[in-house]
Image (cartoon, rainbow, N blue to C red):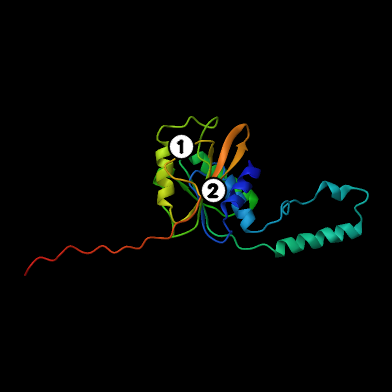
Amino acid sequence: RETLAAALVRFSGWKGDSPVWDPMCGSGTLLLEAGLWAARRAPGLSRESFGFEHWSSFDDTARRRLVELREAARAAERPVPLLIGSDDDARAIEQTQGNAARAGVKIELRNLPFSKVEPRGPAGALFANPPYGQRLQRPAELERDLDRLLERFATYQRTLIVPARFPSRLTASRWQAVFNGPIECELRSYDAQAPRYGFKRPAAAGKL
């Protein structure tokens, strides 16, 4: 749901100024909400008209004021950072493409499983809504692969929506109980870790 996706974006602490990756993008709802929020695009700005514009009390003064508000809202929009979505279902990629085109949000898409996703750049945000419960029977390896995904993106701010009491080896920095329709879930956020820079001593050279 768009409302829950918007809540996840705000709960994550993401500022809208760094790349975002959704490795299980589905129809692209999380990325679209992230892009629209980062752009500071006013809700309903793309609509040609609203119902109240047909009220008898909606006069020329109100009409001019609405035009001014639309112009101010468009002027307030900001550039959107890189949005990347991937999914192992080609139909989901096509659906995201269509939804992004209608919303006017640019998303870079890839058709691959989330177990193969690797970070692009040293920092950013990772948003994910993995398959679970009524959406799909959870395979036994999902928890393991999800933990590995979070570890690969350790330098990213990572936020998920998962079923309540979903098992994981990693401890979330913060969480919030929510409902995804009738399913009791949790928003879990994992703070980004500083990149590790190490030095590996080369093997000792042989004697001449």
Q: Residue at x 90, y 52 (%)?
A: 58
Q: Position of residue 154 (x, y in %)?
A: 43, 53
- Say which residue label 1 marks: 167
Front position in the image: 55 or 22: 22
* Circle 1: residue type: Pro
Q: Residues within 10 Å of mark 2 (few under 14, many from 20)?
A: few
- Residue 39: quadrant of the picture: bottom right
Q: Is residue 98 visible?
A: no
Q: Position of residue 175 (x, y in %)?
A: 55, 45
Q: Position of residue 24 (x, y in %)?
A: 50, 43
Q: Quadrant of the N terminus?
A: top right
Q: Which mark is residue 174?
A: 2
- Find the distance from the CA under tag 1 to the CA under tag 2: 15 Å
**Of the image marks 1 and 2, the number of the one nearer the N terminus:** 1
Helix, strand or loop at disc 2? strand
* Circle 2: residue type: Arg
Front position in the image: 204 or 122: 204
- The answer to whether mark 1 and mark 2 are in CB contact below 8 A is no
In-image side of 169 versus 100 (left or right): left
